[in-house]
Amino acid sequence: MGMRGAGAAVVWAVAGMLALSGCAFLVPDGEGEAKPTPAAKPVPARSATAAPAPPLPVSPSAEPRGAGCSSDAPEVSMGEVQAALGHRAVGLTLTNCGKDPYQVFGYPSVQALGTDGKVLDVWVKRGSSYMGTDKGPTLVILAAGESVRSLLSWTSNPETGRLQQASALRIAPAAGEAARRFPLEGSDVRTVDELTLTAWHAAATG
């Protein structure tokens, strides 16, 4: 064998060894490779809607008061003044604004007030008048919201010589009880000589 043949044989021998040694570095499919990162599990999104607040406790509703009531105490109200031939009259109403029964017997308490707020020296009578008849006092038990009535009247008689100008009337259910002040409007209404009251009586029904 010549030198060229021997060199070629060496080259092929080396190539064969490299091929064989290269096989030793082969790795099974999938081994030696970077493992894929597992996909992140989806996190459920939080709702922006707040949880509903618990319901507030319900308090019992208050019982309705009678018409014209501003407190839980018995209250007097005054209607519109009526005039006839020099006589004046106005209806008074007493309402039980509380929850308990209220006993009524007798006459309202009325005082005439001057422009300075002081009580005027005006006569106050109990009984009938030109404007109404007094049947006398009777006992009335008012349930919550019920009412009784009375008639207050006076005259503007120049012959008596006792005419005075009253700016308001102070009226209570009875003497010694809480009173309310009612202004009087108009000179013909404010001129008084004496006041006459009928007793409290049950309001007409029907």
Image (cartoon, grey):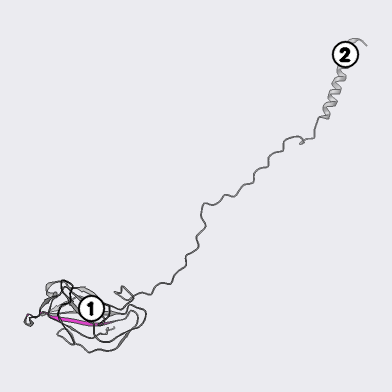
Of callouts 1 and 2, the N-terminal one: 2
- Image check: 175 left or right of 145? left
Q: Is residue 49 left or right of residue 173?
A: right
- The residue beneath circle 1 is 171
Residue 146: numbered disc: none
Find residue 33 and report its horizontal and vertical position in percent: 74, 35
Q: Locate the C terminus by quadrant.
A: bottom left
Residue 156 lies in magenta, yes or no? yes
Magenta segment boundaries in residue numbering? 148-158
Answer whether residue 53 is magenta in the image. Answer: no
Residue 122: image quadrant is bottom left
Establish if 200 lies above or below 30.
Answer: below
Residue 141, percent from left and from top: 32, 86
Looking at this rendering, what residue extends furthest in the right direction? 1
Q: Is residue 4 above or below residue 146?
A: above
Disc 2 target residue: 7
User: Amino acid under label 1?
Assistant: Ile
Q: Position of residue 11 (x, y in %)?
A: 86, 17
Q: Is residue 12 above or below residue 175?
A: above
Residue at 83% x, 29% y is: 24
Q: Amino acid at mark 2?
A: Gly
Majority secondary structure of magenta residues: strand
The quadrant where residue 26 appears: top right
